[in-house]
Image: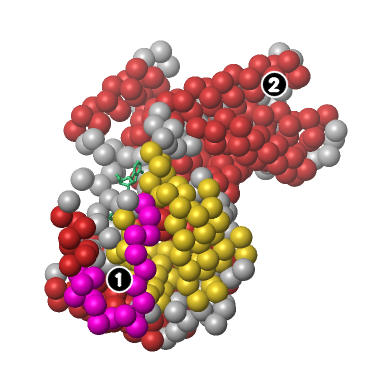
Amino acid sequence: MTRLLDITGLRAGYATVPVLHGIDLHLDAGEAIGLFGPNGHGKTTLLHAVSGLLKPTAGCVRFDGQDITGAKPSAIVAAGLVQAQQGNTLFGDMGVQETLELAAFNTRARSGWQTRLEEVQALFPRLAERKRQRARTLSGGERQMLSIGCALMCNPRLLILDEPTLGLSPRLKGELREAIAEIARKGVPLIVVEQDVEFLLALSSRLYLVEQGEIARMINRADAPDHKEIMEMYFGEQAH
Amino acid sequence: MDGVLIPTLVSGLLLGSLYALMASGLSLIWTTLGVFNFAHGALMTLSAYIAWTVSEQFGLGLVMGFVAGVGAAVIAGVLIELLLVRPFYGNRNMMLITVMTTLAASTILERGISMIWGPRLKQLPRTLDGQVSLLGAPVSAHEALIIVLAPAVLMALWWYTGRTRSGRSLRAVGQNPGSAALIGIDVPRTFSLAFGLSAALAGLTGVLLGSIRFVTPGLGADPLVNAMIVVIFGGLGSLGATAGAAYVIGLLEALLVLWLGLYWTPSVLFVALILVLVFRPNGLFGKAT
Ligand SMILES: Nc1ncnc2c1ncn2[C@@H]1O[C@H](COP(=O)(O)OP(=O)(O)OP(=O)(O)O)[C@@H](O)[C@H]1O
Ligand SMILES: [Mg+2]
């Protein structure tokens, strides 16, 4: 197994507020990992620092052996590290199909974009039914599908999903989780942020608990028997 | 009356075409970066002077003049974005700051042009000689060309922003720069692209205008206010609305000049703008929210 993503001692924050205090995390090719933790403890900040939307203040991010710390987001996407944002509104006045076509923007994504579009439409038939509908008029669930669809159109070598089922009905949550599991089965390495630890355990080989801007705990699936304990720990931590 | 009305409508159409060319350049930058480029008129002027120098002084012909003029405008436009707009990107007051910085660019360009080319009036040759008849009124072939060219340029722009990868990337960056970056669009490069394209339009308009009016340092700045009225009047955004507003303002201006004279026309245009914004805050053709 080659190491696809290697994060060491990563620090980042906003203006004068440091949020991440030295994150260490890694992912091997063909692997899926999960992040969870209480609200506002730095999960999204970590993902933004990885995808280039936020410049890290210290530490190192290596993707496929290449140092991408502080690189431009477009260069990071071109290398194959692609992120679907939390609660993404995308491009309000653009149609569904148009948005998906545009998302195949980087040079690696251009060849074979038609095939990828068909795959995305097979994964999310709702998107195929709404080709010309504008993003701003989509429901929350459809928007999430479009957001994940866009990320897939980028031809990711590593796909990062930030709370893809946030605020959705149980039925839609299930639908999206099934789609995410399908993406993982196809062999796309994944980093998924979710609040539902059960779902993450089923999907990924390793879980990280992000708390106070640090990795408070790393859990291997091999240790799954104590996942009840994980739940207790997680909700216990959240209580104070 | 009949003898005056048709020529007035034709000159309104010509004005509308010029406003459409100017306003589409302004709105390209507005929709991508959310700023107004007050140096747009000065870029037109620069292009006309460069075209004059290359075509008349160097005697290289109007085609070379066109190329040089548009090229100079593009270089100046990209530099304005790089030096005077980009440093303020992400600033909360970006809109206001760039009003000042682009106004500064406009003043510097205009004064520089006066210094280099002096006060003597210049005129560019017409692209086409001869006359044609439009709705029974005689029009110079050059003016007829502008009337035909403006809708063609607008259609090309509409196709570009709606159908091509790079055109769509401009709209994506304008609507959500963060998401655009996350699908691999180089946002700063897209800003340069928007300014470069807009400047090319300014350059084209400047050269066309320079053979209808005398080329003076205020060539482009004079119609700029009306072109901005057009953009706001149209509802700040869609190309179709901007084009529609350009022709409405052009025709209205021509008719007002006929009825009220030059003196009161600008005031009445502003009152019309304010009334439209009171009753239709999203512009004449803007979507209701
Ligand atoms: N743009 C910003 N400017 C200033 N502070 C911010 C900004 N974005 C996030 N923060 C702060 O950084 C901290 C971490 O936020 P972050 O979004 O990373 O949390 P999270 O773990 O993703 O939370 P959630 O589960 O609610 O998505 C929070 O205290 C938040 O208020
Ligand atoms: Mg978050």
Which label sits on residue B50?
none
Residue B199 seen: yes
Give the residue at x 80% y 40%.
B61
Q: Residue A145 — which label? A: 1
Q: Secondary structure at mark 2?
A: helix
Q: In screen coordinates, is A159 left or right of B109?
A: left
Seen from the viewer's position, the closer of residues B56 and A65 is A65
Q: Are marks 2 and 1 on the same chain?
A: no
Amino acid type of the residue tagged 2 in the rendering: Ile
The part of the image, by quadrant, that contains residue B5 is top left
Q: Looking at the image, is B45 positioned above or below residue B189?
A: above
Range of the magenta residues? Answer: A213-231
Q: Magenta includes A9? A: no
Q: At which x and y percent is residue A215?
A: 38, 60
**Residue B99, relative to residue A158: is it above or below?**
above
Left or right side of B181 for A71: right
Q: Residue at x 80, y 34 (%)?
A: B54
Q: Quadrant of residue A225?
A: bottom left
Q: Which residue is mark 2?
A: B113
Q: Nearer the viewer, residue B95 or B168?
A: B95
Identify the residue at image location x=28%, y=22%: B271
Magenta-drawn stretch contains A221: yes
Quadrant that contains the N terminus of chain A: bottom right
Three-letter code for the amino acid on which mark 1 is drawn: Met
Total tally of numbered discs in the picture: 2
Q: Position of residue B16 (x, y in %)?
A: 45, 37
Which-is-in-front pick, marks 2 and 1? Answer: 1
- Callout 2: chain: B
